[in-house]
Amino acid sequence: MCTSLTFENSRGDHFLARTMDFAFELGGQPIFMPRHQTFQGDAGEFTTKYGFVGAGRNLSHYIVVDGVNEFGLGAAALYFPQYAQYEETAKAGKLGLAPHDVTAWVLGNAKSVAELRDLVKTIQILDVPVALLGLTTPLHYIFSDPTGDTAVLEATSEDLHLIDDPVGVMANAPQLSWHLQNLSTYGTMQAEERPLHDYLGLPLKTQGPGTGALGLPGDYTSPSRFVRTVYNKHYSIPTADIPSTLNLLQHLLDTVTIPKGVKLKTDGKSDYTQYRGYMSLDERAFYMEPYDNQELQRVVLTDEMLNDWDTPVEYPLDHTPHVSHLN
């Protein structure tokens, strides 16, 4: 399970951030992928044109789950159980991709969300498992770029097309359309305190600020995380630069971050937030925050990397909690 959101600060900088919630230890870390790569994908070979940086792991080939490319296009894959529908084979003239290879293909071949709207018509997502997990991962995807254009890809039929995401938030199942309709249930909420009315002649004393959000769901289900993220994103105070926006995004993701042990699967394993990823789209930078160290760790795409490097680079994460000593 995961939660993602886009954000534009008052200066016009754009961001895509996400939690990566999973029970299986993914072991992801920041990865730089150069231009013009050939991937031996699990559904067949595919090539890329553009360089990008993101989070992933080399499992016979590089699997990337989120990142940002040299044009500022950001992408993230989120779990979509019981709703994803994949094809067995690709139709003639279309490229077949395993679900877990879509993010790398998008980041390596699309300059923008607008361009991706046409490109997705040339692929089909196939029912091909991840060897390490032994299952086909049910996924859907969120994309955003420096224009603020944001869209979601949900493979619920053989015809793929991007779905506009007007709130710039995505969680897990059900479909995005369901989540957007569900927002109407909470449409009367507000940041301001609500006035109280007397009942049967009894004057009621205030419970203090925050009454405007009474009823905001606080659990870790996908619908609740979606609503909570939309509410907090909508009412948060705007920021004016990249560091302050990253700090705000950390606070927004705090509201949906899952500690170990509080959300157990039927097999007893803990589904928790293994890391949080922040894609600074205009900056072409990827920030990663592992569960055990809340200090942001940054990799930025440079012209030297894009023009001169031809080998993928993995960046080890620092998992040591950092404490600043003031005396």
Image (tube, rainbow, N blue to C red):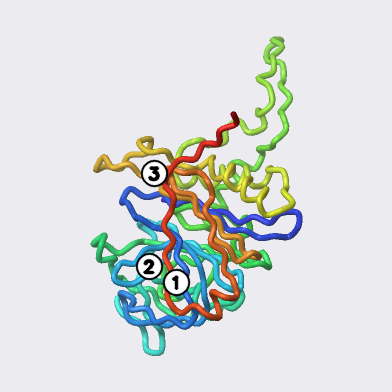
Is 10 displayed left or right of 264 in the figure?
A: right
Residue wearing tag 2: 63
What is the distance, in whole Å, between disc 2 and disc 1 at their CAs? 7 Å
Is 178 displayed left or right of 145 in the figure?
A: left
The earlier-in-sequence mark between 2 and 3 is 2
Residues at badges 2 and 1 in contact (C-beta under 8 Å)?
yes
Residue wearing tag 3: 272
Position of residue 19 measured from the top left corner of the image (x, y, whole percent): 48, 50
Question: Where, quadrant-wise, is the C terminus in this rendering?
Answer: top right
Above or below 279: residue 61: below
Tag 1: residue type? Ala
Residue wearing tag 1: 104
Whether residue 170 is visible, yes or no, is no
The earlier-in-sequence mark between 1 and 3 is 1
Under circle 3, the secondary element is strand
Position of residue 280 measured from the top left corner of the image (x, y, whole percent): 61, 60
Tag 3: residue type? Tyr
Please tell me in which quadrant of the rendered image residue 191 appears.
top right
Is 102 displayed left or right of 324 in the figure?
A: left
Q: Which residue occupies 57% across, 54% down?
A: 5
What is the distance, in whole Å, between disc 1 and disc 3 at their CAs? 24 Å
The earlier-in-sequence mark between 2 and 1 is 2
Position of residue 101 measured from the top left corner of the image (x, y, whole percent): 39, 71
